[in-house]
Every structure is written in C-alpha cells, then in structure tokens.
Amino acid sequence: MNHVSGHGHGNHDHSGHTAMGGAPWRMAAQATLHCLTGCAIGEVLGMVIGTAAGLDNGATVALSVALAFVFGYALTMRGVLRAGLSRRQALKIALAADTLSVAVMEVIDNTVMVGIPGAMDAGLVDALFWSSLAASLVLAFLITTPVNRWMIGRGKGHAVVHAYH
C-alpha cells in the first residue's frame, strides 16, 4: 500500500520517490532512453566504422565504447549548456549523470555483440550484424532502466540533470 507521508520517508512521497530510494519507472525509462540515444549513436557509429575499416573485434569494441561515451556526454551537455552553465560545469554534470548508465549499457551491448556467433564478423549489409546490434541495444535499455531508477531515487544520475531543465 502507498500511503502519503508528511516526512517523505513513507512508501511514497509527493516527489514520486519511494521509501526504498527508487524512482518512478517512467522517469527511469525516460532517463535511460535519453542515455541510450547518445550511447546508440556512438555504438552504431563505432561498429560501422570498425566493420567498414576491417578493424579487429577488440579495436571495433574499443572505438564503439569511446564514441558511446562521447555522444552520451555530448547530448547531456547540450541540454545543460542551454541552461546557461559553463562547459566545465556541464561536463561535471554529464559525467555524474551518465557514466554509470553508459558503462552498464556498453557492457551489455558489447557482450551481446561479441557473444552472438558471427555478429562481429558480419558485414554491414548482413542482417545478422544489424539484428544483433538492435538486440544488444534493446537488452542494454532493459537492463539499464532499473539501474537508472535506483540512481534517480537516490538523487544521482539523471536526477542531477533535471535540476537544470
């Protein structure tokens, strides 16, 4: 049962956070989708560049991870910079908001890509490459959403970014 508590420590308070430090699933899903957007841009770009250039799997994964962090941070910074913060402040907020979320996503989606036989060796015109990449991003979203819910419920992650919107 959810009872409203005047102390904010009951099962549910007016901010939508639960006593266990969670946040509403919708808020967590939105934060994860935001993070996934930057992550997916970098991940897809890295996989496409690595595959097209004939890089080995390790180099392709490294490139994908690096670009996922760059694009993930850049999208968060873009929104925070619009609020008038300096680049340094925006970078600090992006690092606090996105690091764990992007890291979890990258572990999941790259593990899936490497774990599906032939996915990393498939060409850019091969359905196996694209279906594996799509599946890896869906799994990354599903697994990262509870992580973001937990962080937002504790005032961390994307909860930090919401103060500037």
Image (tube, helix red, strand yellow):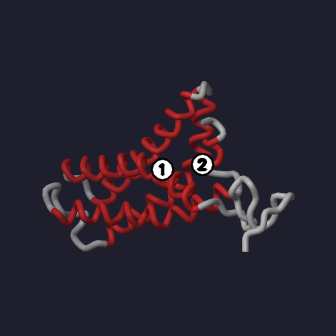
Callout 1–callout 2 Cβ contact below 8 Å: yes
Q: Which mark is residue 35?
A: 1
| Residue 158 badge | 2
- Is 110 or 40 nearer to us in this picture? 40
Amino acid on which the number 1 mark rests in the picture: Cys
In this view, which residue lies farthest toward the left?
125
Quadrant (top left/top right/bottom left/bottom right) for the C terminus: top right
Residue 86: x, y in percent?
61, 25
Numbered badge on residue 149: none
Q: Is residue 111 left or right of residue 149?
A: left
Q: Earlier in the sequence, mark 1 or mark 2?
A: 1
Please, what secondary structure does the residue beneath circle 1 have?
helix
Residue 153 or residue 52, whichever sits in front = 153
In the image, what residue occupies the spot 48% across and 50% down?
A: 35
104 lies left or right of 45: right
With respect to residue 142, does 39 lie above or below?
Answer: above
Identify which residue is drawn at 40% across, 67% down.
139
Q: Residues within 10 Å of mark 2 (few under 14, many from 20)?
A: many
Image location (x, y in percent) of residue 4 = 79, 63
The structure residue drawn at horizontal position 43% and vertical position 65%, both measured from the top left corner, is 108
Residue at x-position 61% and y-position 60%? 24
Q: Image check: 148 left or right of 71?
A: right
The CA span between labels 1 and 2 is 9 Å
Which amino acid is tagged 2?
A: His
Element marked by disc 2: helix
